Every structure is written in structure tokens, then in C-alpha cells.
Image (spheres, rainbow, N blue to C red):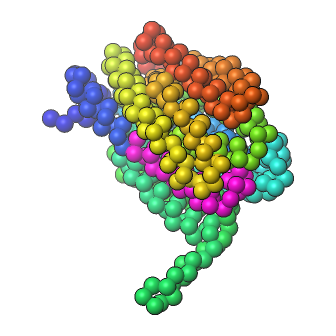
Amino acid sequence: MKTDIKFIREGLPLSWAQRLSLTISLSLPAMLAQLSSIAMQYIDASMVGRLGADDSASIGLMSTSLWLFWGVCSAMTSGYSVQVAHRVGAKDEEGARHVFRQGIAASLIFSVIAALIGIAIAVPLPGWLGGSEVIQGKATLYFIVFVAALPLLTINYLAGGMLRCVGNMKIPSLLSGLMCVLDCLLNFLLIFPSHHFVVGGVNVTIPGADLGVLGAALGTVGAEAICAAVMMYYACVKQPEIKLVGHPGSYRLTRIVTKKAASISAPMTAEHAIICGAQIAITMIVSPLGVIAIAANAFAVTAESLCYMPGYGIGDAATALTGQSHGAERPKLVRRFGNMAVGLGMAVMSVMGLLMYIFAPEIMGIITPVPAIRDLGAEVLRIEAWAEPMFAASIVAYGAFVGVGETKVPALMNFGSIWLVRVPLAWWLAQSMGLRGVWIAMMIELTFRGTIFLIRLFFSKWYDRRPNPAME
């Protein structure tokens, strides 16, 4: 008989083989979704890379600031999706819908405020980050498009998180693939000028808007907006456990749900803000190294994501499995799923790290044709490859902790690791080793971070928390 996530909430026993089968069956679609997201970043980077070093640097300069806004909004939605996992695990579907409705209202309010803040700082931000005047105008334009679209992107995060937490990894995975196709098409039409071909003696023209960096932003946002609409439709209309159509109810925020969401999301939101602040500090360390270093750093980060995004996919599966096991009040199963997911993540990312080390020049060559950027990017990728197994441990263990609502201590661990280890070490090593020193610091910090997450995973009772109280 096929193992199903419903076995968890039905209280049925699960053997080691069944747990592994369920972990893999949820991880694979989530990994594919993450890989699709990476493919989209590769498309953006490779297309913009053809425009030259200045345009590449204008995007690279703003990437960490955009991660700050995206990460904060994504973390905010987790406070609601984790509660839905608990309700579904406890077979309280009406309660899950109640949380979902409030998640929609809270996400829109939060993301609109975040968008207004982003727009307000968009003009001076490139200068604050140390960008030269040559790239500041395009960098501002790129940033404004993305932050203005935050409400749409946040709704996409919410709907995707809701589907994953009830065990539906397939739809987010399929829509991520669709997003890649749309992104490629829209970017081609918006970034470049019109293309003219002769096919069989017939002149063929493919229109192009020739918008450059602005076209890259509009193309990606357009693809994400389309997929957000489809994702939200499926969550609200089709997904049995949480669908809202046919189940009317209030979208008014209530104290119990909001307080619980805040207790889950606040540490994650603060953590994302602090970590992205550290990444912005790293950008400020890299900026004086020149345009080549800025572009190589940004493209290498994009290339490295090919390794670690499968880990985030497995982490999403871990959140769903530990969350539903926690809601079903099965703490031993929570721990077993957490350990198994971390082992799987470390295995997958070890293989990915090895491939990245071997093919680093080819990977960078896909993104940029500029030899100096390609060579420097390949060199730092090979430094980072050594940290991938321990990076996996921190990513997947974090996902398992989030599933039971344990976010405060992991957030502090991430904060301490990046600010007390990576940032000062990067500043010190950059003085003598340039961008290579920054990435050596990153490799050391990720290894340290994975170690402390494994210690908490194996030597604490994170899995044995009190289940959620009943809702009003």
C-alpha cells in the first residue's frame, strides 16, 4: 500500500522504509520547485550578463537588499502556514481555513507596508551600498519594480506555503516550472531589441522591447504574478483541506491566531532581516573591490544556489512532516522525520557540491561571457563547495524546527553565526585576499552553522513541544 501523509494524522504506524518513502515523495517535488526557481535566476543572470559588466553589477548590487524584503515577507507567511500544518495534522480542517483567511489579510497588509518602505528608500539605496554613479540609476529602477510587486509575491509565498504544509508539493512544483518558462519568454521579449531572421526566404521578426535591466525585472515579476494567481486559485478552490470556496468565513484578524503567527514569524522575520543585513554588509565589503568583483560575487551566489536550493526543498518537506506529526501529537515521529530529512539533505547537497566543484567554470560560463567575471566566479564557487554538506544540515534542520513552531533559538543561532563569524572574518580576509577571502569566510561560517544545528537536532528535545492550543 502506498504511504500517504494522511498516515500521520490517522495515527498509523510508519516503518523506517515508509518514513523514507514519504520524505522522498514530498522532497522531490519541493526540490524540483526550488530547482525551477534557480533556473529562473540563471535565466535572468545569463540574459542580463549579455548586456555587459555594468548592467550585471547594477543587479548584483541590489540582490541582497531584495532578499531582505523577500525573506521578511516569506517569513511572515510562515506563521500562518505552520499553524495550518498543525490544524490539518489534528484533523481540524475548519480551523485550518480560519487560519488561511487571516493569513491572506495579514499578508496583504504587511506586504503593502513593506513595499512602501522599499519605494521610499529606492533612490538613495545604491549609493548607500557603495555602488558607483554609473550603475546607480539602473539599480534603483530594478529595485523599484520588485518592491512594488511585493503584495503579489507575498500572496504567492502564502499560497505555496499553505499547499506544501498540507502535503501538496506537486502544484507548487509544477507552477515553479511554468514560472521558468514564462520568465524566459518575457525576459527575451523585454530585455533585448527585436530579432530579425530569414527562414526559408521569409523575413521573420520577433519583437523586443529593448528595456535591458528594467526588462529583466518586469519579465520576472510578470511570470511570478501569473503563477501567484494560479497558485492562489488552487489553494482557495481545489485543495480539499483548506479550500475557502464553499466555506464562507471572516477574514478579520483574531488575537489567538495573530499571536501564534507572531510567535512563529517574528523570530524568523527578525532573523531574515538580520541575516540579510549581514549580506548587505558583505555587499559593502565587496563593492570597493570593483565592478568585476561585484558581478562575480552576485553571479557566483546565483550559481551556488543550484547546490543549496534542493536543501530548501527538503527543508520544506521537513516542515510539512514535522508540522503534521506535531499536530497529531506524535513527538517520536517528529524527531524521526527531522533526522531523516537532515540526512537526506546532507547526502543530496554533498553530491551537488561535488558537481559544482568539478563544473564551476562551465556553470559560470553559462551566466556570463566576460572572462574575468567567469574565472573569478568559478574560483570562489570551488571554495564554497566544501561547505555544502554542513550548509544542508542547517537548512533542513531549520525546516524541521519550524514545523513544530520552534523558531526563536534557530533564529538566534543563524544570527550569531553570520554576524559573529562571517562578517568580521570576511572584512578581515578581504583586505588581503579580495573576493576570495570573502568566500573563504562564508565557507568557514557555513561549516560552523551546520555544526551547531546538528548539535541542537541530536542533543535537545526540540521535537517534544506542547501542541497548539484549541482556537476560539
Residue lying farthest to the left in this orientation: 1
Q: Write down the quadrant of residue 206 in the picture.
A: bottom right
Residue 149 sits in which quadrant?
A: bottom right
Write the residue at 15% across / 35% down.
1
Q: Is residue 41 left or right of residue 16?
A: right
Total tally of numbered discs in the picture = 0
Q: Is residue 215 above or below residue 455?
A: below
Q: Position of residue 294 (x, y in %)?
A: 71, 44
In-image side of 52 versus 239 (left or right): right
Residue 97 lies, in percent from the top left, at: 44, 40
Q: Residue at x 64, y 48 (%)?
A: 373
Residue occupying the point 51% across, 42% down: 360
Q: Residue furthest top?
A: 459
Percent position of residue 266, x then y: 62, 28
Please tell me in which quadrant of the rendered image residue 69 appears: top right
Q: Main SS of the magenta segment?
A: helix
Q: Out of 403 and 91, give the one closest to the viewer.
A: 403
For residue 280, say whether it is visible: no
Please report the bounds of the magenta region as a residue range: 31-60
Q: Please say whether residue 71 is visible from this viewpoint.
A: yes
Residue found at x 33% / y 19% = 336
